[in-house]
Image (spheres, grey):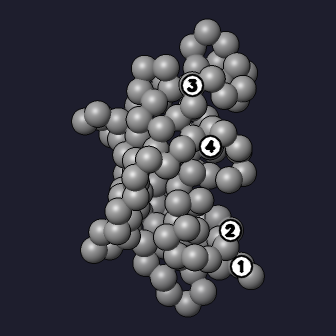
Amino acid sequence: MLIEGLYKVTTTENTETGISAQVHLNKYHSIFKGHFPGNPVMPGVCMIQIIKELTEEATAKNLFLSVSSNIKFMAIINPEVNPDLKLVIDITEESGEVKVKNVTSFEEIVALKLNATFKIVD
């Protein structure tokens, strides 16, 4: 975990096309003191890191983000209001790459959609 203590994976399930994971954000993490004081918001780059880490665990491979063809932030993730997130990650491996399609949501609200390609690194 690159950002120690930011989140905890509470459940992970294999799906036909990848994984579905539930994560709980630590609303007391120091990252939220700067982003933003009095109105904490989950940084988008941290969400991408969580997706990468979950994908690495699912594939048992070390990955490097090479292309993000589509990232849509659709709702603000406030860890004080919505600390529990669901990430559905579709994973396809081909030619030394891992392609990912992700939808992240809380309650019934879609917060993030991402299409990305990760290179497999040794």
Labels 1 & 2 near each other (Cβ < 8 A):
yes
Nearest to viewer (mark 3 / mark 2): 3
Residue 106 appears in the picture as rendered? yes
Three-letter amino acid code at disc 1? Val
The picture places residue 90, in percent across and down from the top left corner, at 38, 67
Do callouts 4 and 2 mark residues in contact (Cβ within 8 Å)?
no
Task: Give x and y (percent) for residue 66.
Answer: 65, 68
In this view, 116 is above or below 78 = below
Give the amino acid type for the residue marked by disc 4 in the picture. Cys
Does 5 sit left or right of 115 as displayed?
A: right
Say which element carries label 2. strand
Instruction: Give the residue pinned by disc 1.
Output: 121
Which circle marks residue 87 in the picture?
none
What is the x, y in percent for residue 17?
32, 73
Q: Is residue 66 visible?
A: no
For the point 72% across and 26% down, which residue is it? 30
Q: CA distance from mark 4 to mark 2?
A: 15 Å
> In which image quadrant can residue 72 be found?
top left
Which residue has dot 4 on it? 46
Mark 2, residue position: 64
Residue for badge 3: 27
The amino acid on which the numbered mark 3 sits, given as a three-letter code, is Lys
Q: Determine whether, in the image, residue 61 is placed left or right of residue 54.
A: right
Label 2 crowd bin: few (<14), some (14–19), many (20+), radius 10 Å: some
Query: First in sequence: mark 4 or mark 3?
Result: 3
